[in-house]
Amino acid sequence: MEAHGLISADVFDKSDPYAIIKCNEQTLKSKVMENAGNDPVWDQLFAFAVSSEITEATITLMDRDTFTPDDPLGDAVIPLEAVFKQGSVPLSKYKVIGSSGKEAGEVVVGLKFVPKE
């Protein structure tokens, strides 16, 4: 997973972005990419227990700050219908929408569905 063209939340320094992934009442967090700026690369795998009733996952992108609360960079909604039907979805780009409702970059995510045995 990676992102491109994120908004810059820091005036004097590069952003330290991380992602919070929510799916089916589960929340996982990526590592913080120190000084990665607008184009972080996390290259991490996350696993969630889901059922076919779950229709989407949400990725909230944040900028970690040391002395102030972390800044929100935007959210991306990842539809899950295709991964349930096809078993996997190759790396795909999803729009990040900022707090103003405008496009604020993109996140790249690949998906794989592994049925419970």
Image: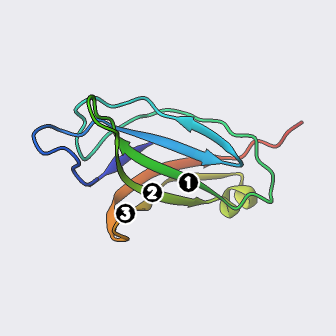
- Decide: marks 3, 2 in contact (CB < 8 A)? no
Please tell me whether mark 3 or mark 2 is closer to you in this view: 3
Q: Is residue 15 above or below residue 73?
A: above
| Residue under pointer 1 | 58
First-in-chain label (3 vs 2): 2
Q: Which residue is mark 3?
A: 99
Q: Amino acid at mark 2?
A: Asp
The residue drawn where x is 28% and y is 36% is 68
- How many marks overall? 3
- Within 10 Å of disc 3 (Cα), the crowding (few <14, some 14-19, many 20+) is few
Badge 2 or badge 1: first in the primary sequence: 1
* Residue 39 x %, y %: 27, 45
Q: Quadrant of the C terminus?
A: top right
Of labels 1 and 3, earlier in sequence is: 1
Q: Which residue is mark 2?
A: 75
Asked which quadrant contains residue 80, the reply is bottom right
Give the amino acid type for the residue marked by disc 1 in the picture: Thr
Estimate the x, y position of residue 112 in percent, counting from the top left.
65, 45
Q: Residue furthest front?
A: 68
Query: In percent of the image, x 38 and y 71: which residue is there?
Result: 101
